[in-house]
Image: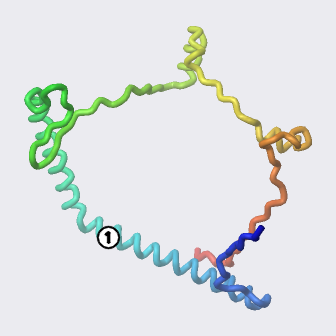
Amino acid sequence: MATKRQKAPALAYACQTKEDTQSAICELGLVQRELTRVETEINDEIAAITDSRKVQIEALKMRSEALLKGIQTWCEANRSDLCKNGAKTANLITGEVSWRLRPPSVSIRAVDKVLETLKVLKLDRFVRTKEEPNKDAMLAEPKAVSGIAGITIVKGVEDFAVTPFEQEVV
C-alpha cells in the first residue's frame, strides 16, 4: 500500500538567531501599527465621504419612503384587481408588488413571570428544559469520565503569542 504524501505550506520567513527574532518582533510591531494607521485613514475617508453626502443621502431616503408609501396605498386600494385567483404577486411592467404573510411567531416579555405562570397553570409542555453535559464537572473529575466514548479531556495545548512592546502617549 502506497503512502499518501502530505503537503504543508512553506514558511515565508524563519528566524535563525536570537537577534533575528528580536529584530522580527520589532518589525512585527511596526507593521501592526502601520496597518492600524492605514485602517484609521480608510475609516476617516469613509466618514468624510459619508458626511459630505449626508444631505443627499437623507433626501434620497425620504423620497424612497414617500414613494414606497404611495405605491403601497394605491396597491392596497386595488389589491383585488391586481391579485386575482388568490395570487400574491402582481407584475406592473416596471416591477412587482407582492403580499406575504409572515409565519406565526411568539414574542415574550418578562420571561421569568411567563415561566412562573406557565408552571402555576400546569402548562409544563410549554417550558423547555435543556439537558447538556456539564463540562466543568468533567474537568473537575476527569478520571470519572475517562474511557467514555465521545468524551476527551484535552490537556497541554499551548498557544504561542507575540506582543511587540509599545509606548502609549499620554
Image quadrant holding the C terminus, namely bottom right
Question: What kind of colouring is applied to the model shown?
Answer: rainbow
Identity, as a three-letter code, of the amino acid under mark 1? Ala
User: Looking at the image, which residue sits at the far top?
Assistant: 121
Please say if 68 is above or below 105. Answer: below
Image quadrant assignment for residue 131: top right
117 displayed left or right of 39: right
Q: Residues within 10 Å of mark 1 (few under 14, many from 20)?
A: few
User: Looking at the image, which residue sits at the far right?
Assistant: 143
- In the rendering, at what x and y percent does residue 80 appear? 11, 26
Q: Residue at x 28, y 65 (%)?
A: 51
User: Looking at the image, which residue sits at the far front?
Assistant: 1
The residue lying toward the viewer, choosing from 32 and 132, is 132
Image quadrant assignment for residue 78: top left
59 displayed left or right of 12: left
The residue beneath circle 1 is 48
Please say if 105 is above or below 138. Answer: above
Image quadrant holding the N terminus, namely bottom right
16 displayed left or right of 75: right
Determine whether the residue tagged by mark 1 lies in a helix, strand or loop: helix
How many labels were placed on the picture? 1
Q: Residue at x 46, y 73 (%)?
A: 39
- In the rendering, at what x and y percent does residue 84 appear? 12, 28
Please say if 119 is above or below 6. Answer: above
- In the rendering, at what x and y percent does residue 77 appear? 9, 29
Q: Residue at x 37, y 29 (%)?
A: 103
- In the rendering, at what x and y percent does residue 65 appear? 18, 46
Q: Residue at x 90, y 38 (%)?
A: 144
Image quadrant assignment for residue 2: bottom right
